Amino acid sequence: MTTNPGFADQSRKRTTARLIGFGLLAVGLPIAIKGGYEFVRVATGDTLDPSSSGFGDILMLGLGGFLVVFGMAALNAGYLGATARYAAGETMPVMKDSAAYLTDGGHRTSGPFCTRCGVRNDEAAKFCDACGHTIG
């Protein structure tokens, strides 16, 4: 019996990373938006409180930004397996065809030869890929 190469409780860890990621995003985005909005208001002079320096707004923007970045990192960790499986599923047929092409020296392994130039063609080919001569 083969063992799983990953963690023993990977499903729980992935789910935990996803929940943490969505939680950090849900908290971080509003904080970052509020901090950015208030910072722009102070910077443009649209605030009623002239003594406001905007330093607290910068901290809010920074805190929200850090929460968003860490939330995205947690989501990346939580969905890494699904992303890798998707990428492998998309690239493997191309890799398989490329490997087959390289191993047979660039020549097709089935199909008729052209009687004029000797190039091997596809099974259903009616004309030669190289010289255009009728096959058959």
Image: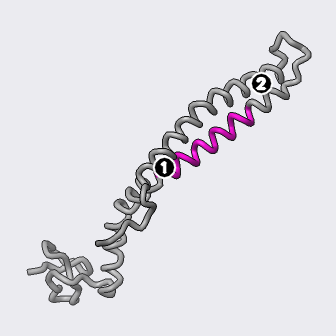
Q: Residue 89: horizontal and vertical position, in percent?
A: 34, 61
Question: With respect to residue 94, does 107 lie above or below?
Answer: below
- Please, which colouring scheme is shown? one colour
Return the residue at label 1. Answer: 78
Q: Residue 8: horizontal and vertical position, in percent?
A: 42, 60
Return the residue at label 2. Answer: 40
Magenta part of the chain: 61-79
Q: Residue at x 54, y 41 (%)?
A: 21
Per the image, label 2 sits on a secondary structure element best described as helix
Q: Amino acid at mark 1?
A: Gly
State the separation of the CA atoms marked 1 and 2.
34 Å
Question: With respect to residue 119, does 53 lie above or below?
Answer: above
Inspect the magenta stretch and tell me whether residue 38 lies in it: no
Q: Quadrant of the C terminus?
A: bottom left
> Taking 30 as reference, is 77 left or right?
left
Per the image, label 1 sits on a secondary structure element best described as helix
